[in-house]
Image (cartoon, coloured by chain):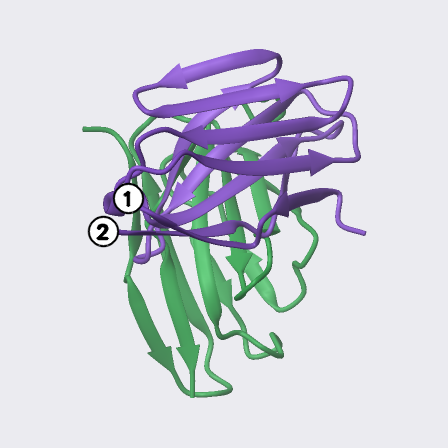
Chain colours: A purple, B green
Amino acid sequence: KNEVEQSPQNLTAQEGEFITINCSYSVGISALHWLQQHPGGGIVSLFMLSSGKKKHGRLIATINIQEKHSSLHITASHPRDSAVYICAVTGSNYQLIWGAGTKLIIKP
Amino acid sequence: DGGITQSPKYLFRKEGQNVTLSCEQNLNHDAMYWYRQDPGQGLRLIYYSQIVNDFQKGDIAEGYSVSREKKESFPLTVTSAQKNPTAFYLCASSIQGAIAYGYTFGSGTRLTVV
């Protein structure tokens, strides 16, 4: 079993829909990261959080440390949000442990 | 603007040849990392370096080598010993090597071995 599990693996939605991507982890962590990878491959860091909730524009990330679970939400989704969203955690040895990613497609 | 530059973006090599991927950062970050990404899998750590002239093996170091002669540069050589080198390679850096500060990522190099 992977230490970081994301769901769903693939998600297709219509423009304007509210999107939720989930991440569960099984190790102790010091931080959880949400990242975005576009088709060209480059990765952009969206959030780093260790508790509670963060918001940036239409993106919201939450984490529940007790349940070892995090969610990434996108409000009023747009085709330009189409990308792979990756969850990663910083484990006890301070290295990143990566999820396999969620491929999101937003149709106009 | 500060950032990480990886070059080239696409690289083709014949089987059996060594190839070096470049990674340069002007962020004054101490730590640098190399990851490999295969379709449908999470990124896997190849090598990392927390300080100049020092580096550590990651989870999949076999068939790869690195150097860290300058703080700004962390080139990765894919040697002929790497059995399946075709993959997407990503370089990253962070302010402090062992602490969970934010990471900056390069745009990646897609290596195809024919």
Q: Is residue A1 left or right of residue A16?
A: right
Q: Is residue A2 left or right of residue A100?
A: right
Spot occupied by residue A103 in the image (x, y as percentages of width and height): 46, 53
Spot occupied by residue A68 in the image (x, y as percentages of width and height): 74, 26
Q: Chain of mark 2?
A: A
Type of the residue with mark 2: Pro
Q: Is residue B101 visible?
A: no
Spot occupied by residue B34 in the image (x, y as percentages of width and height): 51, 49
Q: Nearer the viewer, residue A17 or B18?
A: A17
Q: Which residue is mark 1?
A: A15
Picture layout, residue B30 above or below residue A66: below
Q: Quadrant of the C terminus of chain B?
A: bottom left
The local crowd at label 2, few if under 14, some if 14 to 19, many if 20 or more residues have their Cα within 10 Å, is few
Q: Which residue appears farthest toward the top when viewing the image?
A: A52
Picture layout, residue B27 above or below residue A77: above
Q: Give the mark nearer the N terminus: 2 vs 1.
A: 1
Please identify the quarter of the rendering in which residue A17 is found: top left
The local crowd at label 1, few if under 14, some if 14 to 19, many if 20 or more residues have their Cα within 10 Å, is some
Type of the residue with mark 1: Glu
